[in-house]
Image (cartoon, rainbow, N blue to C red):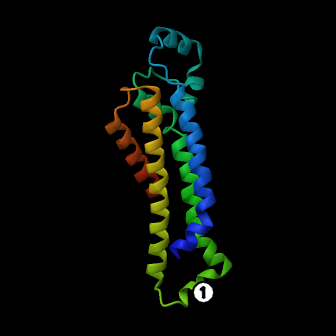
Amino acid sequence: LFKASLRANYLVIIIITLVLFMYSKMMISIFNPDLDSNVLSEFMKLLPDTFSNMFGFSGIISNLVSHIARYLYGFIFIVFPGIYVVSAAYKLVAKLVDSGSMVYLLTTPNSRVKIITTQAIFDAAMLFIIICIQTIFGIIICTSSFPGMLDIGKYINLNLITFFTLLSVG
């Protein structure tokens, strides 16, 4: 059942991972540690409050982890993996019930609890793999683009919090 679930969902996992790669590279690369905070403050005063808050331009970003947290984990790293978690949960359980395939699974010597537990473990494991790959990719991009500026401990904590948030959604 775990292997069948992997075969049914591997393409979605790859697409989500690649989209997150693209956004990670793009958002990390726009970080500018030398940006004069006075220039940015003056620019933000020109924008209406609702506009600046909507796009996350409220406040000055002083370090790389704050930049990543605001521009990646404020929206993109919640929405795209969230879409995966919800669609995978549907495909792993509800779609089987709708299509009648769950009846065939229940005729095997496996209990309902074992079937649902296997599907939940698969969903959590794939989410964990996506987050781990993104964490490693983010560390590589940050250390190559901005050596010594990434607080790796805080960055890993940020990814753990994201994982547990998305796991609770799933």
Is 75 located above or below residue 52 in the figure? below
The reply to whether residue 170 is visible in this rendering is: no
Query: Which type of secondary structure does the marked residue at label 1 adopt?
Result: helix
Choose between 148 and 76: the one closer to the eye: 148
Choose between 128 and 46: the one closer to the eye: 128
Residue at the far front: name it: 144
Amino acid tagged 1: Tyr
The reply to whether residue 52 is visible in this rendering is: yes
Residue at the (35%, 43%) spot, across then down = 157
Residue at the (56%, 46%) spot, across then down = 79
Q: Quadrant of residue 167?
A: bottom left
Q: Which residue is mark 1?
A: 104
Residue at the (48%, 67%) spot, across then down = 122
Residue 56 appears at what percent x and percent y? 53, 28
Residue at the (44%, 18%) spot, across then down = 33
Is 87 located above or below residue 114 in the figure? above
Residue 113 appears at what percent x and percent y? 44, 80
Please state if 96 lies on the left or on the right of 60 as rendered.
right
Residue 42 appears at what percent x and percent y? 52, 9
